[in-house]
Amino acid sequence: MIYLDQSATSLMKPKEVADAVNQALGGTLGNPARGAHQAALDALKAVGRARRSLAAFFEASPLDIAFTPSATYALNMAVKGALTPKDRVLTTMTEHNAMLRPLYEMQSQGMALDVVPLHKHGFYETEDVFSTIKPDTTAVAVNAMSNITGDIAPITHIADICYQRDLLLILDMSQYAGTRPLPAIKQWPRALIAFTGHKSLYGPQGSGGLIKRGPVPLRPLITGGSGVLSFSKAHPDSFPEVCEAGTLNVPGILGLEAGVKWLADQGLHAVSGHLSALRLQFVESVRKIPGIQVYGSQQDAGPVVALNVAVMDSGDVSRLLDEDYGIATRPGAHCAPLWHEAMGTRNQGAVRFSFSCFNTHEEIDTALDALRAISKAI
């Protein structure tokens, strides 16, 4: 199989990730912060080391890294924990439901929500953010990279806007992290940044986190055991404890640490270069195939491409790619309903190709040949 569905999850992972997970399950690590015996202490030390490794990767403080089961959990914690019904939030039509649904839930409680529209190519410009902000806007909640088109948000400009207007920035870095060098997070005064472990950080499914920058009070989304302040009726509101109720997924955390260390060893500039070359090869050739429409601005994009073949249902195209050519892609709505509504693809969906460090130029050529054959057969 040629796996071109990296944006859903990384199928191929470094051997170091599996080794770390297996070692964590090897009978030596207990429950971190839940005992004074050696197994518990070793688990606590391992999680602390992983927190420091993630902090070095993201250029953050270790105590500003909270481990979560996914980016979805992290975004729910950020939106529901930091915002109130009195807030006014700006978001965009490119967002994933992991961002949108928590925002809609807060909107149902009275929070105001403004949405940046898309241009006909399927993305927005920095000026659109400026023009959508209202005098009473208190937060901006956006993704760093579209999970459909791979378009990169003007993150630095948005962070500057938030700084100038004292707005909270809630950033979904699910697709971005691990594909290119990171923005200067440590320079942002107030932000909550969600990331997942199982995509381009090459960690296990069930791993992710939330990064806090600056003074951002949070209410806990989930309460329970914390290992500290056990006689308090309220869950601790200190970070990261406010996000880490219950037993942590130690094997997942250590697998995520191994993925991040592997990426750092490869060098993000080298990783980004390889992914950009794969994307450029694919986009330049696929645009020349009759009947294929490619979406997105293409000005600055990551290793994700969305397209349609004439009027064919995206599910049919993806099925043919899988059954006839052994190529795995993702059809449908990609959990991004506002984008599809804006682009008129609600019924057709789109076929998403997304690339990883482990893909080759030969695999891209095979995918292009398959699309040529499918388009020719219409």
Image (cartoon, rainbow, N blue to C red):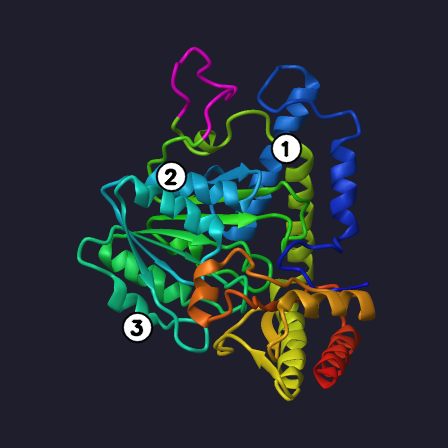
Residue bearing the label numbered 1: 249
Most foreground residue, 365 or 343: 343
* Element type where label 3 sits in the image: helix
Label 1 – label 2 distance at C-alpha: 22 Å
In this rendering, the answer to whether 13 lies above or below 310 is: above
Residue 188's image quarter? Answer: bottom left
Q: Residue at x 23, y 54 (%)?
A: 137
Q: Evaluate if marks 3 and 2 touch, with contact meaning CB atoms under 8 Å apart.
A: no
Considering the image in quadrants, where does the N terminus appear? bottom right
In the picture, measured across the screen, residue 281 lies left or right of residue 218, that is right
Three-letter amino acid code of the residue under disc 1: Asn
Image x and y of residue 373, in percent: 76, 82
Q: Earlier in the sequence, mark 1 or mark 2?
A: 2
Q: Which residues are magenta?
A: 222-236
Residue bearing the label numbered 2: 80
Image x and y of residue 23, in percent: 78, 35
Disc 2 residue crowd, few under 14, some 14–19, many 20+, Cα 10 Å: some
Image x and y of residue 67, in percent: 54, 38
Closer to us: mark 1 or mark 2? 2
Q: Evaluate if marks 1 and 2 touch, with contact meaning CB atoms under 8 Å apart.
A: no
